Image (cartoon, rainbow, N blue to C red):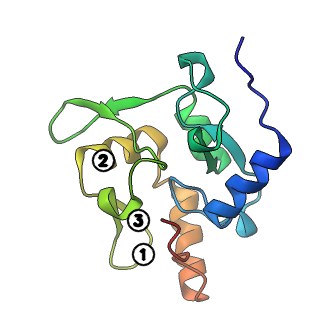
Amino acid sequence: MRERRVPAHLKRLVVERARGCCEYCRSQARFAIQSFSTEHIVPTSRDGKTTLDNLALACQGCNNHKYTKTEARDSVSNKVVPLYHPRRQRWHDHFTWSDDFAVVIGLTPIGRATIEALHLNREDLINLRRVLYAMGEHPPAEID
């Protein structure tokens, strides 16, 4: 059976690399009410390894919605596409912010499918983004 527990030294490296932000919705851990997770991009149930290049920092909402998913349907093309992979792809190639920085917008089939599958625009996140933007704390600095 694959190692599911992520060793502490890998967790630290993942948090540092992500600069304390969810690598999917870009929420900042310092403003979160729930702890963030070090998640397997390719789940261990699908033979994903517990290695630095298969780990991402995820807020609890994104982690729970992603669960073991690796693909989802794009609402525009209606095709099943891979979910965004934070180690192999750049966030800004697949996503952008709305004019008020409250909503994540998908630029590609991968971006759109990921937004839907992981619910990147959950109501509580949109509200938090608006407050943080007004305080000059959002959007977070680039991490890729």
Q: Which mark is first along the chain, 2 or 3?
A: 3
For label 2, the SS is: helix
Residue drawn at point x = 39 percent, y = 38 percent: 83
Q: Position of residue 99 (x, y in %)?
A: 33, 78
Residue for badge 2? 112
Numbered label tally: 3
Mark 3 secondary-structure assignment = loop
In three-dimensional space, the C-alpha distance between marks 3 and 2, rounded to whole angstroms, equals: 12 Å
Residue in the picture at 59% in, 79% down: 131
Q: Amino acid at mark 1?
A: Phe
User: Dots 3 and 2: beta carbons under 8 Å?
Assistant: no
- Residue 139: x and y in percent read 51, 76
State the residue lying farthest toward the left: 77
20 over 65 or under it: above or below: below
Q: Provide the residue designation for mark 1.
A: 101
Q: Which numbered dot is residue 103?
A: 3
Q: How many C-alpha atoms fall within 10 Å of the one at disc 3: few (<14), some, or many (≥20)? A: many
At a point 60% along the width and 79% down the height, the residue shown is 132
Image height check: is 90 above or below 44? Answer: below
